[in-house]
């Protein structure tokens, strides 16, 4: 199955006549780079016939900072903070992707305590990310109150992070060979208190938005993405799983402690915006289950097996490692010359970049308001697209 | 037996201005030109003061209500409980650059906010706040309200058109389609009340509810009309779930994208005053306006209810409706434009027409003891 992505040229030179008996003209609008739906700085050129979307073309690059090029001058430990600033809602998981790649390539061993804490922290981050996404989806569809409810939970989880890590957003926590800091003594008690609270919050989400007739009308059967097309576009994460493809690296590769806990890979059946919405809500429940299974049995041990000043030199060759973040597969490709402690070439495979191009395949034919639903259901973080 | 103050007035006693109900009647009853001019001045000052006061209070209330729905506190820094927040906001808007986009239609762009504000200001003059407080009571009151209310879309259309911005244009077109469509349902709901009360004068409608408010005295027909009017008028207000002409996340700010400073404030104020007039009209038509709550011949209860001044009754009912509209706004997501049209043309309109027919049958068969 192939997917054709239109170019800016196609948009500009398409015929201006609309397919209707009335003589109306199609027109172009720039949705972004400064637009509420851009969630940052993302430019999307739309070709519209009245309210109907005819063509969509995302034009990313407004927050391109050359992160990958910068990383070619940094040691592997120094790369970690830069990954925080890609998909900032999955900062810890991005850190883990680099750490996992480096550990596998350099043969660095970690202990079970480290893997426990990494898994728990990643799941907390996934909960935080999905809670924020839920709020933002509400706001995009006009229910502004949901936005602040989503932020409320995000802040509560942020406080737990802050206590251990000292930061709430760009956490720089998981390092090659271990963690930056050990958890605080009351971390376990706090997380255990958090689990029933978040369960209640998810129920609250269901009553505030899920059950609302208008909300369902806005999402059901809108922007249907079938599994084959999703795979052809390279989608990952909840977007792919909502289309019915049970692809979750946590279950497939079983890295960290994921191989030893019970959790379901949530998949959708239709692949519409509603499935993408509900898959994430269910994933929040699964994340809580994972944390619940791990939190009581964190073993004793060192929080890092590698001195923070130790040189890490990867063997010559190409090394690839990947992690399931809140938005999909985040991959790290490192080319090492085998001599220096910095990568010769580095590339991040970011989930949002691939998920972004879904709009070109599924948005045409829908209204402007549906385009908002589709865009919102993809849960894009723009710095991760532009890098 | 109704309270003497609330009884429908007979013909005006000649030469006695205090027997009159409204400022307009008092002005025309007076023989002295200066007194007449004084009443006109009073009307103008009254509406202006009310406009300013309502803007201040409603914006503050909206912020507080929204905050409490969203687990926040809301404004609390400017003055005690943040009551001067609106004044601070107004000052900020006053000091902003008065910017008209170079490509915009200069005249229309400047004219639009005034047109948008004109409608609610005119409607403020018609509302019976209490038996003694009303500026003018037209015998075609409801017709006038509907006509003037329909004019409100002009300001929005002109704003969207003159801004020369695609988002503004989409917003204006949406507003045009939406407001004109929902006006039909709103008018059908109003006609039910006209049928019940047998008058178009707003004051007359309030008097007709002395034995019970139309929302339940009209039984199913009255209640259905109330619900339809509430939905349709929320749509005319462009408030969530019908805020698609603004559609913050879709059209940035819709028809007022290109407006800033005081011109934006005018649209903002117009929205809030509109909310008040709609709530006041809902209270007047369906909830008895300033008429106290009466139950049959329970003299004690009725007497106690009469002890509360009519102005307080009016304010209480209007506030309740305002709170309802705010509640809806801070809970619901936004409809899509075609779903909006579907709701109006395929759901509300058939129900509205059927409801009007039922009401007509009820009135014709004298199924209920209507006062005629």
Image: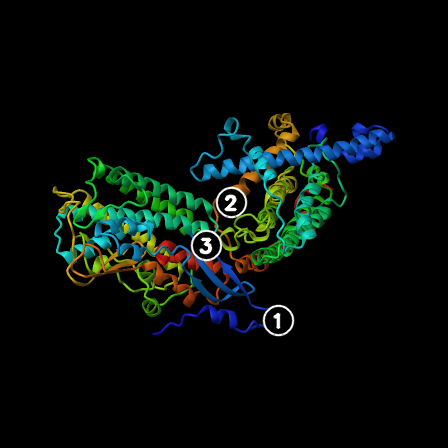
The residue tagged with tag 3: helix, strand or loop?
Answer: helix
Looking at the picture, do discs 1 and 3 lie on one chain? yes
Residue tagged by mark 3? A37
Residue B201: x, y in percent? 73, 42
Q: In the rendering, which numbered label is found on residue A22? A: 1
Mark-to-mark CA distance, 1 and 2: 37 Å
The answer to whether residue A117 is left or right of residue B92 is: left
Q: In the figure, residue A300 lies in which quadrant?
A: top left
Q: Could you tell whether A104 is left or right of A199 in the image?
A: left
Q: Is residue A260 left or right of residue A379?
A: left
Q: In the rendered image, which residue does mark 2 sit on?
A: B328
Chain hosting mark 1:
A
Q: Nearer the viewer, mark 1 or mark 3?
A: 3
Nearer-the-camera pick, A64 or B209: A64
Q: Is residue A316 above or below residue B241?
A: below
| Label 1: how many Cα within 10 Å (few below 14, some 14–19, many 20+) | few
Residue A267 shows in the view: yes
Q: Residues within 10 Å of mark 3 (few under 14, many from 20)?
A: many
Give above or below for B331 relative to A344: above
Q: Are marks 3 and 2 on the same chain?
A: no
For marks 1 and 3, the one nearer the N-term is 1
Q: Nearer the viewer, mark 3 or mark 2?
A: 3
Cα distance in 3D space between marks 3 and 2: 23 Å
């Amino acid at each position: 199955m192939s997917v054709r992505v239109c170019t800016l040229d196609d948009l500009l030179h398409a015929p201006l006549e609309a397919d209707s008996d009335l003589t109306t003209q199609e027109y172009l609008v720039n949705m972004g780079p400064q637009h509420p739906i851009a969630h940052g700085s993302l430019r999307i050129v739309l070709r519209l016939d009245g309210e109907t979307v005819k063509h969509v073309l995302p034009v990313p690059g407004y927050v391109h900072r050359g992160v990958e090029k910068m990383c070619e001058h940094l040691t592997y430990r120094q790369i970690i903070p830069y990954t925080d600033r890609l998909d900032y809602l999955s900062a810890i998981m991005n850190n883990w992707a680099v750490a996992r790649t480096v550990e596998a390539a350099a043969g660095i061993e970690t202990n079970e305590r480290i893997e426990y804490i990494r898994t728990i922290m990643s799941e907390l981050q996934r909960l935080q990310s999905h809670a924020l996404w839920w709020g933002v989806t509400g706001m995009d569809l006009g229910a502004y109150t949901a936005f602040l409810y989503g932020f409320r939970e995000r802040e509560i989880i942020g406080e737990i992070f802050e206590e251990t890590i000292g930061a709430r957003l760009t956490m720089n926590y998981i390092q090659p060979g271990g963690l930056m800091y050990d958890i605080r003594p009351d971390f376990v008690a706090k997380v255990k208190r958090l689990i029933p609270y978040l369960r209640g919050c998810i129920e609250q989400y269901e009553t505030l938005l899920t059950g609302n007739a208008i909300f369902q009308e806005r999402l059901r059967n809108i922007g249907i993405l079938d599994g084959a097309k999703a795979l052809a576009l390279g989608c990952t994460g909840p977007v792919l799983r909502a289309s019915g493809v049970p692809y979750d690296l946590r279950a497939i590769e079983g890295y960290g402690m994921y191989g030893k806990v019970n959790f379901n890979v949530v998949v959708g059946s239709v692949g519409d915006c509603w499935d993408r919405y509900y898959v994430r809500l269910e994933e929040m429940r699964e994340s809580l289950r994972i944390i619940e299974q791990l939190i009581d049995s964190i073993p004793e041990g060192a929080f890092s097996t590698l001195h923070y000043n130790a040189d890490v030199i990867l063997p010559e060759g190409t090394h690839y490692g990947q992690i399931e973040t809140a938005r999909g597969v985040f991959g790290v490709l490192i080319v090492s010359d085998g001599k220096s402690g910095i990568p010769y070439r580095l590339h991040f495979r970011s989930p949002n970049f691939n998920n972004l191009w879904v709009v070109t395949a599924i948005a045409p034919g829908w209204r402007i308001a549906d385009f908002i639903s589709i865009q919102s259901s993809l849960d894009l973080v723009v710095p991760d697209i532009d890098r | 037996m109704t309270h003497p103050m609330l009884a429908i007035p007979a013909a005006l006693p000649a030469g006695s201005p205090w027997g009159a109900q409204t400022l307009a009647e008092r002005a025309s009853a007076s023989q002295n030109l200066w007194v007449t001019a004084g009443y006109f001045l009073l009307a103008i000052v009254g509406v202006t003061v009310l406009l300013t006061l309502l803007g201040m209070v409603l914006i503050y209330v909206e912020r507080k209500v929204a905050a409490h729905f969203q687990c926040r506190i809301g404004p609390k820094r400017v003055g005690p409980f943040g009551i001067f927040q609106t004044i601070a906001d107004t000052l900020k808007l006053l000091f902003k650059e008065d910017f008209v986009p170079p490509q915009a239609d200069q005249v229309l762009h400047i004219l639009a906010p005034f047109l948008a504000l004109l409608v609610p200001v005119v409607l403020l003059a018609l509302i019976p706040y209490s038996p003694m407080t009303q500026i003018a009571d037209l015998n075609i009151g409801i017709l006038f309200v509907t006509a003037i209310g329909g004019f409100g879309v002009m300001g929005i259309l002109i704003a969207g058109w003159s801004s020369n911005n695609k988002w503004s244009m989409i917003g204006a077109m949406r507003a045009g389609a939406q407001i004109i469509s929902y006006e039909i349902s709103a008018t059908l709901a109003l006609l039910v009340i006209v049928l019940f009360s047998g008058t178009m004068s707003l004051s007359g409608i309030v008097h007709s509810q002395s034995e019970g408010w139309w929302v339940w005295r009209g039984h199913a027909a009255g209640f259905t009309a109330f619900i339809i009017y509430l939905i349709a008028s929320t749509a005319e207000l462009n408030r969530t779930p019908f805020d698609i002409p603004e559609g913050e996340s879709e059209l940035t700010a819709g028809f007022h994208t290109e407006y800033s400073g005081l011109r934006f404030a005018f649209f903002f104020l117009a929205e809030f005053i509109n909310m008040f007039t709609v709530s006041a009209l809902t209270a007047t038509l369906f909830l008895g306006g300033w008429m106290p709550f009466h139950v049959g011949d329970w003299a004690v209860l009725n007497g106690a209810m009469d002890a509360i001044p009519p102005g307080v009754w009016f304010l209480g009912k209007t506030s309740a409706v305002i709170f309802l509209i705010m509640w809806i706004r801070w809970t619901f997501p936004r409809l899509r434009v075609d779903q909006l049209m579907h709701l109006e043309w395929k759901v509300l309109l058939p129900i509205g027409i059927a409801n009007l027919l039922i009401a007509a049958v009820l009135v014709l068969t004298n199924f209920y003891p209507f006062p005629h």
